[in-house]
Image (cartoon, grey):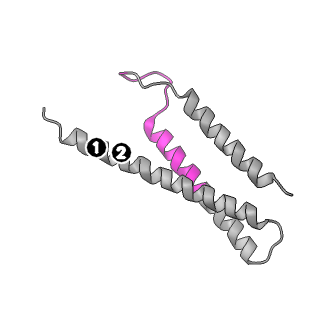
């Protein structure tokens, strides 16, 4: 039994959990050397895009009859890409809601 896909998924989940655990709470004012929000957002979008492209490529190879990927690896990659995209959409929804809340504040 090939466990490469499962190990890859576990490593991805562990790295995401480590990044979330190491995130420091936001402080008021700009912190020197701190991560730029736009850069973090762009990086996250790029990761989702790469996951989708990789999953699509794996599915195309499987459909073409190439034996380099197993069906379960392709399905795991497709589900990972789908969940990543759904997470990105939820983040976008929260950002839009926050923007509307700030714009509707009384000054």
Q: Which residues are magenta?
A: 28-50
Mark 2 surroundings: few (<14), some (14-19) or many (≥20) residues within 10 A: few
Judge by depth and name the residue closer to the eye, 37 or 15: 15
Q: Which of the 4 quarters of the picture holds residue 5? A: bottom right
Q: Mark 1 — residue?
A: 99
- Vertically, is 16 above or below 72? above
Where in the figure is residue 42, as x and y percent of width and height? Answer: 49, 46
Where in the figure is residue 25, as x and y percent of width and height? Answer: 45, 25
Q: Which residue is at 71% across, 43% downward? A: 11
Horizontally, residue 81 falls left or right of residue 9, namely: left
Task: Provide the secondary structure element on which disc 2 rests.
Answer: helix
Which residue is the extreme one toward the left?
107
User: Does the rendering let one see residue 54?
Assistant: no
Q: Residue 36 magenta-drawn? A: yes
**Residue 95 numbered tag:** 2
Tell me the distance, in whole angstroms, between the alpha carbons under discs 1 and 2. Answer: 6 Å
Q: Residue 66 magenta-drawn? A: no
Where in the figure is residue 48, as x and y percent of width and height? Answer: 56, 53
Q: Which of the 4 quarters of the picture holds residue 54? A: bottom right
State whether the magenta stretch is mostly helix, strand or loop. Answer: helix
Locate the N terminus by quadrant. bottom right
Q: Is there a contact, CB below 8 Å, between mark 1 and mark 2?
A: yes
**Residue 88 numbered tag:** none
Q: Which residue is at 69% across, 69% downward? A: 59
Count of numbered circles in the view:
2
Which residue is the extreme one toward the bottom?
64
- Vertically, is 58 above or below 101? below
């Amino acid at each position: 039994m090939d466990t490469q896909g499962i190990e890859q998924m576990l490593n991805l989940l562990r790295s995401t959990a480590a990044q979330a655990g190491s995130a420091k709470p936001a402080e008021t004012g700009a912190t020197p050397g701190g991560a730029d929000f736009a850069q973090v957002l762009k990086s996250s979008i790029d990761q989702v895009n790469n996951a989708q492209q990789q999953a699509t490529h794996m599915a195309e190879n499987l459909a073409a009859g190439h034996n380099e990927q197993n069906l379960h690896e392709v399905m795991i990659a497709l589900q990972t890409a789908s969940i990543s995209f759904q997470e990105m959409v939820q983040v976008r929804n929260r950002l839009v809601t926050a923007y509307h809340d700030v714009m509707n504040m009384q000054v």
